[in-house]
Amino acid sequence: MNDIDNTNTSRREFLKGTGRIAAASALAAGIAPRMYAGESNTINVALIGCGGRGTGAAANALSVNNGPTKLVAMGDVFGHRLKSSYANLQKSHADKMDVPEDRRFVGFDAYKKAMECLRPGDVAIFTTPPAFRWVHFTYAIKKNLNVFMEKPVTVDGPTSRRMFKLGKQADAKNLKVGVGLMSRHQRDLEQLRKRILDGDIGDIILQRGYRMHGPAGFFSSLPKPPGISDLMYQIQRFHSFLWASGGNFSDFNIHIIDHQCWMKNAWPIKAQGVGGRHYKQSPDGVAYVDQNFDTYSVEYTFADGSKFFMDGRCIEGCHQIYSSAAHGTKGMAIVSRSGDCGRPSSIYSGQNPDRANRTWVSDVGRADRDPYQNEWNDLMDAIRNDKPYNETENGVQTSLVTSLGRMAAHTGQEITYEQILNSDHEMAPGLDKLTIDSPAPLQPNSEGRYPIPQPGIVKDREYKDFA
């Protein structure tokens, strides 16, 4: 189907279109016209990236409270992930699933095939490793599709600059874009932010964030086993490799970094940090090959001189903290009580969060307590009612600020926002041309080990390739 050139065409107008237009669009996309019979108000969805987060996002899309949705296509580079995701979604949302075998795509071109099953104004979900965001977003804009993309959306300066431009292109076409930074849709945090901006705790002078627990996800990886290429191994275990995800610092800590910048209503101008690899062997004594530090502590500085400290740790047996707080000249706030944006939020007189000092606690009705569902309800409301809605810029800013702290720890240098934004180190160039036979962006040495950060030695980028 030819691209729609009229940038003012909205999804609302599309949904009001005639049956003839819907049928023609369906035929052009290779979907039988009967799919749309009597369903002109249905928003169709394609899932690209069928892991746990993708399955959860699709379930939220199919559970929106402001109009019918249907999943019509799925894509992944791993067939077993797609099969598992399909089975789980079929169990919970069978009446909203219309994904026959010929609309389940596997391979590096699966994202194109899945999006080609949609009409202009439908929604593509991007929950692959973050390195591929710009590739998929570029194609979605070309196809006039609304988008929901998971965080992070970039991992370095060059891709951030590219995504900023793509966000403006989406605006020019009146496309709606949601980014999976759900803290901004957590109604408790919304209430707290309003009070902070109204001056309830005075001027913020210090913020703290903690995500300290045992290893999670693909935080660590053993040497690549036989039977899988370096490329597929790195995509499969994306948390272990900086090019694919920004590593565990970016993927794990971004939510707290995001909501603390939101509370401050500002972005840091620089960062310095520390970190280390303490226990990088398996219980059997095999050396891990991932690029992550086990611990991170980053100090962000805002233009007014105030500080935000983000501490991360993935070590078993240590004291666990997973929360955030903001301190002001008049008092302090618990932003997230537990987790990325755990409710309720609260305000205290003084700097001690004792119950006796509490002056306010958030109050949200049960129906609005799930931030993952809220972000989808908000996105779909914007699509159906043609409201301005594009979270790309914030998603890129947050991803870049997170990478700023990671780069400071990995290099041992103080890094400014402008330095990382304008850096020329693109960790994985050419991902739009990737095939199953392509070499991996990160190459191992003869022992199967991958390059790791070397603070104080490699100072201008986060690692130096072996080549």
Image (tube, helix red, strand yellow):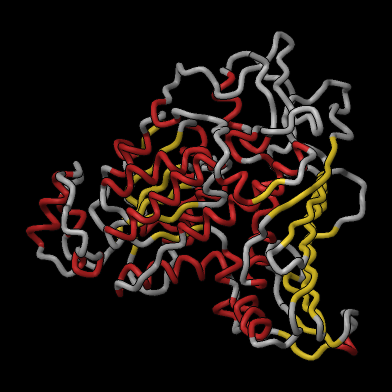
Q: Position of residue 326 (x, y in %)?
A: 77, 73
What count of labels does the image hold? 0
Nearer to me, 358 or 72: 358
- Quadrant placement of the C terminus: top right
* 277 sits left or right of 363 in the view: right
The quarter of the picture where residue 349 lies is bottom right
Q: Quadrant of residue 209?
A: bottom right
State the image coordinates of residue 314 (x, y, percent, origin top left).
81, 44
Q: Looking at this rendering, what residue extends furthest in the left direction? A: 20
x 21%, y 59%: residue = 7
In the picture, the quarter occupied by the N terminus is top left
Above/below status of 134 relative to 341:
above
Residue 348 makes an appearance in the image: yes
* 27 up-or-down from 265: above or below: above
Name the residue: 65% across, 87% down: 198
**Residue displayed at 39% across by 26% down:** 433
In the image, taking residue 417 as reference, residue 293 lies left or right, namely: right
Pick whichever, 158 or 182, lies toward us: 158
Q: Is residue 221 visible?
A: no
Vertical side of 447 occupied by 430: above or below = below
The quarter holding residue 440 reads top right
Q: Is residue 26 above or below residue 457?
A: below
Whole-percent x and y of residue 102? 29, 36
What residue is at 41 percent from the left and 47 percent from the top?
Answer: 47
Horizontal placement of 122 versus 280: left or right?
Answer: left
Position in image of residue 278 (x %, y %): 89, 35
